[in-house]
Structure formats: structure tokens, C-alpha cells
Amino acid sequence: MTSRPQILLVAGARPNFVKAAALYQAFDRAGLTTRLIHTGQHYDESLSGVFFEELGLPQPDHYLGVGSGSHGDQTGRIMIAFEPILLAEQPRAVVVVGDVNSTLACALVTAKTVYPDGSRPLLAHVEAGLRSFDRSMPEEINRLATDSVSDLLFVTEPAGVANLKAEGVEAAKIHLTGNVMIDTLRRLEKQARLSRADERLGLKDKDFGLVTLHRPSNVDKPEDLAALLAALKDVSQELPLLLAAHPRTQKALQGLGFESFEEPVPGWIDRGGLALCGPLPYLDFLGLMIKSRVVLTDSGGIQEETTVLGVPCLTLRPNTERPITLSEGTNQLVERPEVLKPALARALSGALAGRAPELWDGRAAERVAAVLAERLAGDESGSPG
């Protein structure tokens, strides 16, 4: 084992890579040796492979290649694949990010692992404490379970600190460090503004809305997805919308008769309506967010990114685990498809102006690295206990 503190940094899905990029670089600057684990939870090239080049991440040290599957199947296969790597590497710490199945699976394995010398790895969760208070969301279960077994909890906003304390977590474990996703956004914002994806897709600056959908509550039931699509088509007559469809959403849309996810034909925006395309690389998608007039989404990370960019965001959900995007940012909840039109009118009127929350300043990963380095330096045995 290296004499420098060794960390396994776990990423498996699109938003994980954005956060992992900031952490990997900050860990390196703090003198922490890091090995990157890619679970393969997202395996489409546009969702994972290209991100490594764009985000400045090295190729993963270990690729688990688990692919898609049910929650239980996917989580179980990640655990089975990750355990021998953890035992072989014997890192001082494992860092998991976000709330996807990869996060929970690797957290559970880490929390139950004891090395032959009797020590155990430290488990750190970045983006801890977020709560939607809706246990029908798989991500909420992942958040609760991961936080409950973690030794260090790095929090993006004050509500997360309050949630953890209300759950009985001792204060010494909790660190309000800011939002590492915003670190990457700030670092690459200039490059994203140079993206020409808008020209390729026939879009006009501040004359379109950008849409993403992937939550089970929106896409898994055909009747719910059909109602949401009808509402989107209705408002798209006022503002053209581009739906960048996640693979999960593509499959659901195909069940409703949509067949093509090729790039929209030139001139479509002049006719208005709803156009579809497949997933987009990070820089192209960030560039489109910057140039859009409004973003409609069910993604947690996009709520945060639009808040910092000052772009109005309509979250197509009845709740959010990121309340600061409502109180300080540009976010508004849209609880039902039938209220989408008035919500859009409010967004287009300029009523959703906000500001970047405190500590969302591009230095969150540095603060995480500093806490982790100090903890490892003071714990030479490798045991968090």
C-alpha cells in the first residue's frame, strides 16, 4: 500500500462523474492518492465514456460494468463486484457521491468491511443530508441508508445539516462544504458557452426550453408519461421545447409510439412544438442550459445548476430534496401536468430570479479534501472508530 492516504472514489451514473471530477482534482492537490471506480451503472458512451475526456477525469482504475437492471439486481451486482476490489486495494477511505444505486451498494460494502489487521475503511458521503421526504423515490432510500452508515457526511446546503441532526447524527460527522457539482460547472462554464450544439440542433439563443425526464414517477407508468407529454406539447406551442431523452425515457417513449431520437431537422424551432434527441455530452448540455430560456426537469442536479446559472427551472415533481433552489434559486415545483402552463408563464415573466447559495463558489471539493486529509492524518491506524 502507498504511504500516502489512499482513497477509492466511486462513480457510476452521469451526475456522479461531474462531482467526481471536482473531488479527484481536489484530492490530488491535497496529497491524497485516489483510485477511481466506475461501476458502469450508466454505460452509454454519451452518458459515461465521453465524460472522462470532457471533465478531465483519468480512465477508471476499475470498471465494474454492471449495466442496467432492477434496483435489487443492480445493487447486488455492484456489491459483489466491488467487495473484492475493496479487499485487494485496502484503501484508507471510500468516498461515494450522490444518491444512485452505486452509492448505496458501495457504501454498504464499505461499512461492513474489516481488513485482516482489524482496521476498517472510512466511509465518506458527498452530498449527504438531502431529503425529499418521499420514500416512494428509490433515491430517497439510497440517501437515508447511505447517510446512516457513513463516517463523514459532506453537505451542500443548510437544510441537509438540519435533516441529519433531526435524524440523530452526531454533529462531528457533519460538514457543510458546499456543492461540488458547481465546482465543475464553474471550471468548464467558459468552454460550455463555446459549444455549438445549439446551432447543430437548430436552436435560437433564449428562444427555447430544455427538457429532461427520467424519474420513475414520471416515466414508468404510460398514462402518467402520456399526460406529461401532452402538457409539454401544449406549452411548446408558446415556447419550442427540446427533450433530451435519457435511455430510460427513450424506452418509455418508444412504448408510446415515439421511434426516433435523431437530432431534430433544421427549421423545426420556427414551427414550434416538442422535439426529441438522445442524451448529450456534458459540455453540450451545459451550453444548452446556459442558452435556454427555461429548463423543465425532474433532475436534482439540474435544479442546482440552473440556480447558479440564473436560468428559470420548472421541476416536474411535487417535492424536491434541494429546498435551497426554491428559497434562493430559480426553481419552482410543478406538481401536476395541468399546472404546467401557468408555471411556465410565471417563469417566462422573470419571476424566478435567484442567487447562488453560500458556499456554491467553486471551492467545495477543496473543503471536502481538507476535512478528509485532516481526518486521515489524525487516524494513522486506518480505523474510523
Image (cartoon, rainbow, N blue to C red):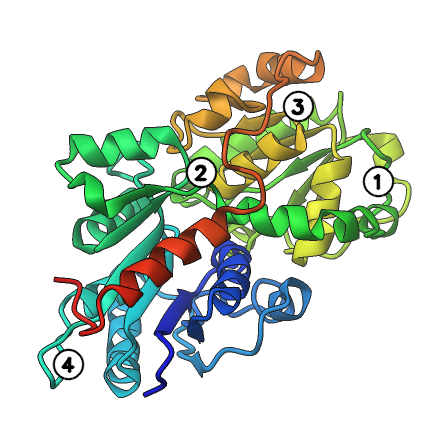
Q: Residue at x 71, y 27 (%)?
A: 236
Rendered image: mark on residue 164:
none
Quadrant housing the C terminus: bottom left
* C-alpha gap between disc 2 and disc 4: 43 Å
Q: Residue at x 29, y 34 (%)?
A: 161
Position of residue 5 relative to residue 323, above or below, is below
Q: Earlier in the sequence, mark 4 or mark 3?
A: 4
Provide the residue designation for mark 3: 234
* C-alpha gap between disc 4 and disc 3: 58 Å
In this rendering, the label closer to the viewer, 4 or 1: 4
* 113 on left or right of 16: left
* Category of crowding for the residue at label 3, using alpha-carbon neighbours closer than 10 angstroms: few (below 14), some (14–19), many (at least 20): some
* C-alpha gap between disc 2 and disc 1: 26 Å
In the image, what residue type sits under mark 3?
Asp
Q: Earlier in the sequence, mark 2 or mark 1?
A: 1
Position of residue 267 relative to residue 38, above or below, is above
Rendered image: mark on residue 115:
4
Does dot 3 land on a helix, a strand or a loop?
helix
Rendered image: mark on residue 218:
2
* C-alpha gap between disc 4 and disc 1: 55 Å
Q: Earlier in the sequence, mark 2 or mark 4?
A: 4
* Category of crowding for the residue at label 1, using alpha-carbon neighbours closer than 10 angstroms: few (below 14), some (14–19), many (at least 20): many
Label 4 close to label 1 by CB (< 8 Å): no
Provide the residue designation for mark 1: 203
